[in-house]
Amino acid sequence: MIDKMSDIPLYVQLKQELKDKILAGHWKEEEKIPSEFDLMKTYKVSRATVRAAIDSLVLEGFLVKKHGTGTFVRKMRPSIGFEPLISLSYALETLNILSKNVVLQKKRIDLGEKLKRKLRYKETTECLYVSRLRYVDDIPIAVEDSYLHPQIAPIFDEKDLSKSIAKILINETDLSISKVEQVVVPRLAQDNERRLLMIHRETQILYMQRWIYVQNQTEPAYYLELIMRNDLSTLRR
Amino acid sequence: MIDKMSDIPLYVQLKQELKDKILAGHWKEEEKIPSEFDLMKTYKVSRATVRAAIDSLVLEGFLVKKHGTGTFVRKMRPSIGFEPLISLSYALETLNILSKNVVLQKKRIDLGEKLKRKLRYKETTECLYVSRLRYVDDIPIAVEDSYLHPQIAPIFDEKDLSKSIAKILINETDLSISKVEQVVVPRLAQDNERRLLMIHRETQILYMQRWIYVQNQTEPAYYLELIMRNDLSTLRR
DNA sequence: AAGTGGTCTAGACCACAAC
DNA sequence: TTGTGGTCTAGACCACTTT
């Protein structure tokens, strides 16, 4: 209950009240909670107080607001906080850097022995290959080669691949990620990389490989290989 | 300037106005911006509008508020370059989260076969072991076990290990990092981990291993194993 | 048309930090 | 004591979604 005499701010009390109900399952996932006006009446507080409590819970990922419709309990993601480790888009967003991808190529390919070993496939001999260039303000910052396992490739057939593949994997599928392996090597850019990223010979880049495993599959669902500029400190928006 | 006839919300216009001034260097880093009341007068808007604009910029990491003192331009965070990939401290800083370490143990240890394999040592059979607990606002968020190769361990004999080991490696030595390998697995916390992190059984954690290689050495200079809470988004400030 | 969240105003009092 | 940000109220109108 809410105590107006308490030293604890009303919106904090209301926030805790709502959070407790969410965690206790009082409202189910995806279910609508009472409207802001209902909450005003129920708890006898002003709308600003209700909104402060709700906004805070939205920020913490417990609630989602839909304009004109209502406020809903957010489907719990098993991996909140995990995203920046998986998705370059997400990692950049935490720095307030917005990037966009341009798809250069997208095709099914057969894997040679060498590539098969690199992708850590055991049996599978084909995959969906996507080559992309990532831009921040029309400046190319990374070249990404993605390899999608046949088991998950169909999901991406009709997706907009200018968006983050990792984000799609996390948010638009029911797959849960079981392991992420990653190797990063700093080195100088090679000629072809320099041309794509429009950088000088001396510029250092990061070469990164990433294997993402889902659920019980033994082969990586998503292999990513990228090179990126290592001097993004000046790109804040 | 702010246009009350525009379709763009006033607080968004004000936010953009302030952001532009920050990026243009109109106020320097760590410098105080005008008070909320000054901004109300200057732009002829209500306090709620001013606060909405400022709160949004705080959230994005451009401003910091200090109760009773004022609002200040935030010091620029490190880039997404190499550092956040190596150092949890850096990675958290990009999320606007400041953390500190407490050293629980620090001792030389002899390695059994199992540990030797885990550390990926070929010949070496000893190392410097450091166990630390990482806090954000007195909340324990991670337990870290660090293993330092004998070749670099002496460097850390007299260092303050409440600071980031990776940061020391990057900034206070001449060693250059040649490779970083990392494995992340999301899973539920075990009993002993739950106690240290003061979390419930259902809470998901991230288990991470990281091998850092320097220069031409074939054995990792720094092996790190940690478990951390996977709900750090709720700790953002 | 009705209900929801989004924006905005004007005013009030409180808690904290610095002078 | 003064100035700052923190909390809270009561009211208004707008934009979006559903009925």
Image (cartoon, coloured by chain):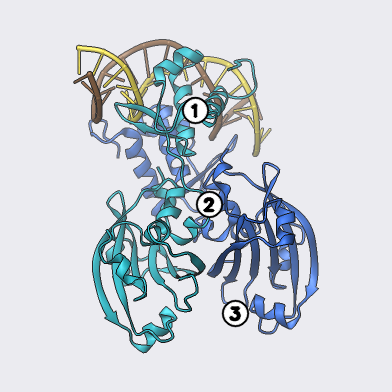
Chain colours: A blue, B cyan, C brown, D yellow
Residue displayed at 51% across by 57% down: B82
Horizontal side, residue C15 vs residue B169: left or right? left
Q: Residue flagged by tag 3: what amino acid is it?
A: Thr
Q: Quadrant of residue B128?
A: bottom left
Q: Helix, strand or loop at disc 2?
A: loop
B211 or A82, nearer to the observer: B211
Horizontal side, residue B213 vs residue B148: left or right? right
| Dot 2 alpha-carbon crowd within 10 angstroms: few under 14, some 14 to 19, many 20 or more | many
Marks 3/2 same chain:
no
- Residue B107 on image: x %, y %: 24, 74
* Residue receiving disc 3: A218
On-image quarter of the N terminus of chain A: top left
Q: Residue flagged by tag 2: what amino acid is it?
A: Ile
- Residue A21 on image: x %, y %: 39, 49
| Dot 3 alpha-carbon crowd within 10 angstroms: few under 14, some 14 to 19, many 20 or more | few
A48 or B116, nearer to the observer: B116
* Residue receiving disc 2: B80
Q: Is residue A118 above or below residue A28?
A: below
Q: Residue flagged by tag 1: what amino acid is it?
A: Ala
Q: Which sits earlier in the primary sequence, circle 1 or circle 2?
A: 1
Q: Chain of mark 2?
A: B
B124 or B144, nearer to the observer: B124
Marks 1/3 same chain:
no
Alpha-carbon distance for marks 1 and 2?
Answer: 26 Å
Q: Nearer the viewer, mark 1 or mark 2?
A: 2
* Residue receiving disc 1: B53
Q: Is residue B26 above or below residue A152?
A: above
